[in-house]
Image (spheres, grey):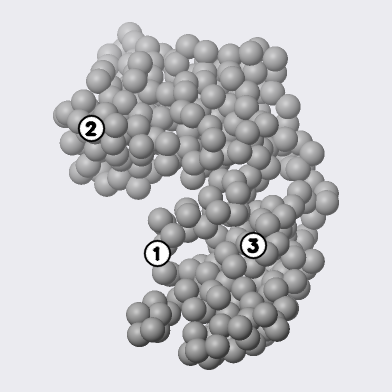
Amino acid sequence: MVRVTEIELMDRLFLIGAPGIGKTEVIKQKALEEAKSLGREFVDLRRASDELKHRILEEPSRYYIFYRVIAPHIFPEDINFPLRNSGEFVKFVPPLDIKILTLEGIRGVLFIDEITNLGRKDQESMYLSIINEHELGWNLRLSDGIKVVLAGNPPEVSSIANLLSAPTISRTTVVEVDPPTVDEWGSYMERAYGDDWEKLTYAYLKVFPTDLFKTPPSPETLENFPCPRNWTRLALRLKEVRSKSFAEAVIIGTVGREVGSKFITFMNKTPPPVEEVLERPMILQNLDVGTKVIALNAVACRPEALMKR
C-alpha cells in the first residue's frame, strides 16, 4: 500500500481505499498541479458556468478539465441522445459536459468515483468501454489528452461495494491506498481553509495520531467513524457551533463515540493564560500532555504576544 498523498497521476489508475481518506481531494490536487505545469487554465467542470463551458468549446487548448462523476449516478442512456435529422436516420448527440471531454486539444482528468457501487451490469459495461477504449457511445470518444482515474471502496468497509469483473480490473492499474499522515492533513487544512477551522483538532491528532483514521467495526453501522474527511468536517463545524452541549453532540456524531469522547476531554482541559506561559515557560512541565499541547497551541495562535517578548 501507499499513502493516498504519494500517488501519481496516470491514465487508467484505480484507487482502492476506505471512504473519507482523501482520494478525491488528492486527485483534484494532482490535476491542478499538472494544469499549472502545462500552463493551462484549470477548470472544475462540475462548478463551471455555461458561459465558461462555451468558451472551452471555442478554444479547448487553453484549458485543463477536472470532471468528477459519481459512477452509480450515470447510466448508458445518459450519454447519447437521439436527434432526428430525417425520416431515415437519427444522429446521437452528447451532453455539453461530455462533449467538452471529447474536444481535440483538451487536457484533463475524468475522475470516476464510487465505481464499486454500481447497481446495474450495463453500467459496468459502459465504464469498461470508457476505461479500455476511451469510448462513450456512438462515435463518441474521449480526447487523447484526458486521463481516466477511478476510485472505490473495498467490500469489507462498505456494505454497498461490489467486486468488479476481471476484464474491467485488467484494464486498470489497481493501487491500494492508505490515509495521509496527520501532518499532511494539517498542511491540507492550512492551504484550503487558512484560519477558518478549529486547530485544536490538529493539536489533538498530533497527540493521538492513530485517531486520524479507524476502520469502521462493521460495513453497516449507525455510528460514525474517524477519517480525514470527517476530521475536516468537524474542524469546520466547530468554528460555527456556539452551544457547548451541541458541540459535544456534533463531535461524537462526526468522529464516533470512542474518539469523540477523548477529543471532548482534550478540549475541556484549561491551560494557563498565554501571557503566563510566555512569562514562566517552566510551568509547562507540571501539565499533563493534553493541557500542555493546548497551551502551546494557544501560544502559536497569538503571534502578537510573542513579538512583544
Q: Which of marks 3 and 1 precedes in the sequence?
A: 1
Q: Amino acid at mark 2?
A: Gly
Note whether residue 287 is visible. Answer: yes
Q: Which of marks 2 and 1 precedes in the sequence?
A: 2
Note whether residue 152 is visible. Answer: no
The residue under the point 49% across, 29% down is: 8
Q: Where does the image place residue 63, in percent across and percent down from the top left? A: 25, 32
Q: Is 163 above or below relative to 27? A: above
The residue under the point 47% across, 58% down is: 189
- What residue sits right under mark 3 in the picture? 205
- What residue sits right under mark 2 in the picture? 39
* Alpha carbons under labels 1 and 2: distance apart: 26 Å
* Alpha carbons under labels 3 and 2: distance apart: 37 Å
Q: Is 215 above or below relative to 251? A: above
Q: Secondary structure at mark 3?
A: helix
Corner quadrant of residue 211:
bottom right
Q: Where does the image place residue 133, in percent across and percent down from the top left? A: 48, 11
- What residue sits right under mark 1 in the picture? 194
Q: Where does the image place residue 258, in percent across and percent down from the top left? A: 79, 66
Q: Secondary structure at mark 1?
A: loop
* Left or right: residue 293 compared with residue 57: right
Q: Amino acid at mark 1?
A: Gly
Q: Is 158 above or below relative to 185? A: above
